[in-house]
Every structure is written in structure tokens, then in C-alpha cells.
Amino acid sequence: MQLSDFDFDLPERLIATRPARPRSSARLLVGEGDSITDAQVTDLTRWLRPGDRLVLNDTRVIPARLRGTRRRETGQGESIASIEVTLATPRMDGTWNALVKPLRKLQDGEVIRFDGGLQAECLGREDGQAVLRFNLEGDAFDAALAESGQIPLPPYIAAKREADAQDRDDYQTIWARNSGAVAAPTASLHFDEALMTALRNHGVEISFVTLHVGAGTFLPVKVEDVTTHKMHAEWGAVTAEAAAEMNATKSAGGRVIPVGTTALRLIESAATETGMQAWQGETDIFIYPGYRFKITDGLMTNFHLPKSTLLMLVSALMGQDCIRAIYDHAVTQEYRFFSYGDASLLLP
């Protein structure tokens, strides 16, 4: 299975830099088996049945892009240099992996100072990233980030424009509550209160899980043989309540449909051959064609980058030929791509 099998031509004009307004007015491509239908996100109740369950990721995106300074004594006196830090992945011990510019000039043991009284000590390096320990935690850490950090937009948007105040709302789901992500579960950005009410009135059930999306979600695949690719690890949790809800849905004949590849990867990490279980920890699950899904019956997701692990995931769910047809249709019909783009509902 070669990386080139997951390539396609995408005109740059189709990369969305702002979301649809209102959120649920975005276009929705429905792939049901081999059939393709053009619709809107507000039409979800045409395909979701009473008793189906949507699984939503309730992670909250933090303002993870920081600008600070490091101070160092030299023969000529104190030297002050600017440092840019983008938090990448929280670690189990409370430290963070972070992208630092310039990393080569930052020494182990040095302290980076930011606004709001926030500081970080560089403990070392790992896979081209710095390992940082901050002086604050919990609510104090969140407050300091809110004061001094910026929303870290995906690179394909950041290349076109700077993040602004509007992104703090646009790049956050309406149900975000557990802080820790540095990228949004973007399929969920299409949901607003009106759509949630319509879904509940239709009899669609909702479960929440948490997967803190890391910056590794944007890393390119660098190996030609995709089966040798190593995924980044991300922390997630499925509560006993959410696991029981999904098991009950399956037992009653309903479908479990995660919203977003993050929710899908998490529930497939937690699922066993006999059903869902409560689960907490880091997952580096890599889903590509040939994978046997244990709990997932469908997926709502945005349109993904060429040669990306997420394109491989949807190809595993629908089949490579089917996804190729769906993406050809999306490009021809000028759907908007990536994080702020339109959505697809994939029902194998």
C-alpha cells in the first residue's frame, strides 16, 4: 500500500479560511454505499434514524501559540532573545511537548518567560520538539494561556492569514469543556444549538468522549509504504457511562456514528470484540485500508489533505475506490476543504 495511492489534485481555492455562517449551513456530501448526495448539514435528520447515536469529542482547544523570551548572561551582559512556542501534546506527567522556534538556540534548563506570569523550563528534546515544564497548572495555567496565547490555526490556514479574535469562537465546538487540545475536532464545528435541538427531537442520541487533539494531526506521512508509518500519540478517555450508552445503542439495533476522526480513533481504541469499555490513556492507533472496525457504523467528517492519515482512515471505512469517487465529486462540485470547510457523512 503506497502513499501515492492516497494522492489527489486539490485546487488551492477550495481551501476554506473561514467557516460557514451559521455553522450548520455548511454543505454536506452524503456517501451511502456507492451513492453520493449533495445536501446541507441541516439535512442530517434525513439520514440519521431515531435510535442512532452520535459520538462527540468534548475537548477544548487552548490558545497554544505563545511568544516569549529567554534571558542569558554573556560577556557583554544580559542577552534577551525572542522565542515562539506552540504547544503540541500534553504528557502524562504534566509536561508538554512543544514546537519551539528557534529550538537549536534553546538550552536544556533554560526558562522561557511569557506574559501573565507564565514560565516554562526546557527539560530536554524529543523527536525535534522541546519538553517543557510550566510553573502553573490547572485553572491558573488556563487563565495565563487565555491572556498570552493565540489559537494555533492549522498550517494551511495560517499560511493564508493570521489568527484573530473571531477564531477563538470559530475554532471551538459549542460543547467544548475539557481543555487540552491544540487543534479542533473540526467536523463538530458544524453543530449549533438549532441543529442539536433538531437531532434530539428526531430521536438521535448523543454521547461525549474526550480526545485531546495534538499538533501531530498535521504532520505529513513521510514513508512510501504507509503500513510503516508511526502515528503520534494523543490522550483520550471514554467514561463508563459513554461506553454503556454505545453498547445499549448497538444492542437496540441503532448505529454508532462518531463525529470526526478524533472521536472515531478514540472509540476504536477503547472497543473490544464484545463491545465498548471504559478507557483512558494515550492512543496511537493508525487506521488504514484493511482495518476491521469494532464499534463504528458511520462517520461525519470534513474533507482531508492528500496523502494524509485521515484520508487513509476514511478509505478504510468506505473503500479506496469509493473515497476516490467521493473526493472527485467534492472537487468537481467545489466543496470547501479542511478544518473550516464543508462536511461529509460516510455510511458504508
Image (spheres, rainbow, N blue to C red):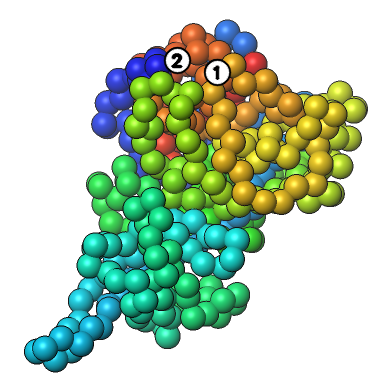
Q: Do the CB atoms of the residues marked 1 and 2 lie less than 8 Å apart? A: yes
Query: Which amino acid is tagged 1?
Result: Pro
For label 2, the SS is loop
Nearest to the eye among marks 1 and 2: give it: 2
For label 1, the SS is loop
What residue is pinned by disc 2? 1
Q: Residue at x 62, y 49 (%)?
A: 282
Q: Local crowd at mark 1 within 10 Å, few (<14), some, or many (≥20)?
A: some
From the viewer's perspective, is residue 177 above or below residue 290? below
Q: CA distance from mark 1 to mark 2?
A: 9 Å
From the viewer's perspective, is residue 176 above or below residue 22? below
Residue 271, image quadrant = top right
Question: How far from the left and from the top, in percent, is residue 216?
Answer: 44, 46
User: Could one spot residue 222 in this view of the protein?
Assistant: yes
Q: Local crowd at mark 2 within 10 Å, few (<14), some, or many (≥20)?
A: few
Left or right relative to 343: residue 81:
left
> Could you say which is closer to the camera, residue 26 or residue 348?
348
Q: Give the label on residue 289, or none.
A: 1
Q: Residue at x 20, y 82 (%)?
A: 80
> Could you say which is closer to the camera, residue 308 or residue 148?
308
Query: Which amino acid is tagged 2?
Result: Met
Left or right relative to 182: residue 224:
left
Question: How far from the left and from the top, in percent, is residue 59?
Answer: 60, 54
